[in-house]
Image (tube, rainbow, N blue to C red):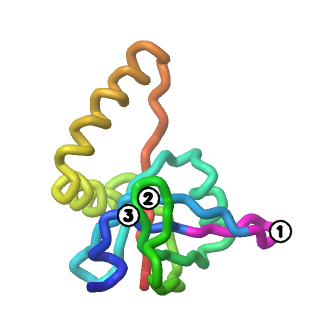
Amino acid sequence: MGIADETYVLLTTFRRNGDAVPTPVWIVGLPDGSAGFTTELDSGKVKRIRNNPKVTLQPCDMRGKVKEGSAVVEATAEVLVGEAAHPIRDAIRNRHKLMTSMFKVTDLFRRVVLRKNPAECAIRIVL
């Protein structure tokens, strides 16, 4: 089982000063052997990936607790927007149907009540 077969991974991105920033994310394997996830376009991880595309991945639970004995995988990430992000979005929705349905409710709340509609993007990870 490869890293792209995991449900959650601890994605570590790097600040300009080199400090590591770990974040648990849903991940999905893609037909070309890469992996991906979706996030908000103005998120910190997107800013860090645009500055430095080198990332590490490690299997974890939804809270970011790393699986004991798991290996760290080095990879390169790229930010995809618009049509380029659709295959990753679709793969996430297909693999995580229940969770994405629950997030639709919170997204609706944010848009209607809080009047926030952040742009979304996808991150493609080349392993």
Q: Secondary structure under badge 2?
A: strand
**Of the residues shown, which amino acid type is indicated by label 2?**
Val
**Secondary-structure class at tag 3:** strand
Residue holding disc 1 = 17
Amino acid of disc 1: Asn
Q: Position of residue 88 (x, y in %)?
A: 30, 62
Label located before the other in sequence (1 or 2): 1
Magenta span:
12-19
Label 1: element kind: loop
Residue 8: assigned label = 3
Query: Where residue 73 sits in the image (x, y, percent)?
Result: 49, 85
Q: Nearer the viewer, residue 74 or 87?
A: 74
Which residue is under mark 2?
25
Residue 67 numbered mark, or none: none
The residue positioned 83% from the left and 68% from the top of the image is: 17
Disc 1 crowd rating (10 Å Cα; few below 14, some 14-19, many 20+) is few
Q: Quadrant of the C terminus?
A: bottom left
Spatial CA distance of label 2 from label 3 is 6 Å
> Residue 102 at x, y = what percent?
26, 35
